[in-house]
Amino acid sequence: MQRVRATRREVLATLAAGAGAAAFAAHARADDAKPSATSAGPTPASHFGFTKLIVGDLDKSAAFYEATCQLVRQTRIDTESAGRKLSEILYQPTAPGGAMFVLIHYYDTPKPTTGELVLGFNTRDIDAFVARAQAAGGSIERAPYAIPEMKIQVAFVRDLEGHLIEVVQETA
């Protein structure tokens, strides 16, 4: 894992052009002649690229998400934005062309409130995911349950700081 000290502009340039961020850079370019995988129309010039979760303890949160969601760390960036010192840990997308997940900690802010978002993770083994969350210190909000009409199982877990994670597994 790299550890970088950079300006905000350098961070964005690194994401757009750096190794490991090829999916980010590829999606950032508009290619109107090429149809997207999800529609018959042209590839959009804009798309959803990442989620940043603000956390109070970056290192503990990183350990939780790496153990539970099996995320692969791409880089850590220590920088300043609008006069605020911050650190971010960026994770590789979990699927080709997928969005990035980023943990961010502002040094001038205590642990943020929870309930501001629900993180969604797909898995092939919902029971193992829930077990990993518990083993990493998280809690079960709702144990896995089936939604037959949607052909999925769903569970809700909370991370170490109380952020809600919705876990989905497709069923036959």
Image: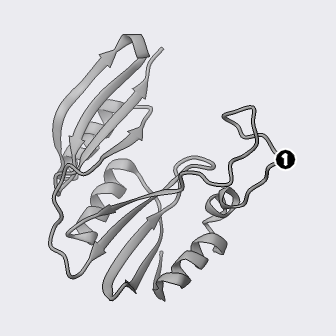
Q: Nearer the viewer, residue 68 or 16?
A: 16
Position in image of residue 148 (x %, y %):
37, 11
Determine which residue is flagged by label 1.
Answer: 33
**Is 122 rendered above or below residue 89?**
above
Q: Nearer the viewer, residue 32 or 171?
A: 32
Q: How many residues crowd mark 1 within 10 Å: few (<14), some (14–19), many (20+)? A: few
**Is 69 rendered above or below residue 143?**
below
Relative horizontal placement of residue 43, taking residue 155 as reference (left or right): right
**Is 127 rendered above or below residue 132?**
above
**Is 47 rendered above or below residue 129?**
below
The amino acid type, in three-letter code, at marker 1 is: Ala
- Give me the residue at 27% from left, 31% from top: 155
Relative horizontal placement of residue 88, taking residue 4 as reference (left or right): left
Position in image of residue 31 (x %, y %):
78, 53
- Give me the residue at 33% from left, 89% from top: 83
Position in image of residue 131 (x %, y %):
25, 39
Label 1 sits on a secondary structure element that is: loop
The image quadrant of residue 36 is: top right
Relative horizontal placement of residue 32, taking residue 110 as reference (left or right): right
Residue at the outermost right position: 33
Q: Nearer the viewer, residue 157 or 135?
A: 157
The image quadrant of residue 128 is: top left
- Give me the residue at 24% from left, 51% from top: 116
Q: Nearer the viewer, residue 103 or 8?
A: 8
- Give me the residue at 19% from left, 44% from top: 134
Position in image of residue 58 (x %, y %):
27, 70
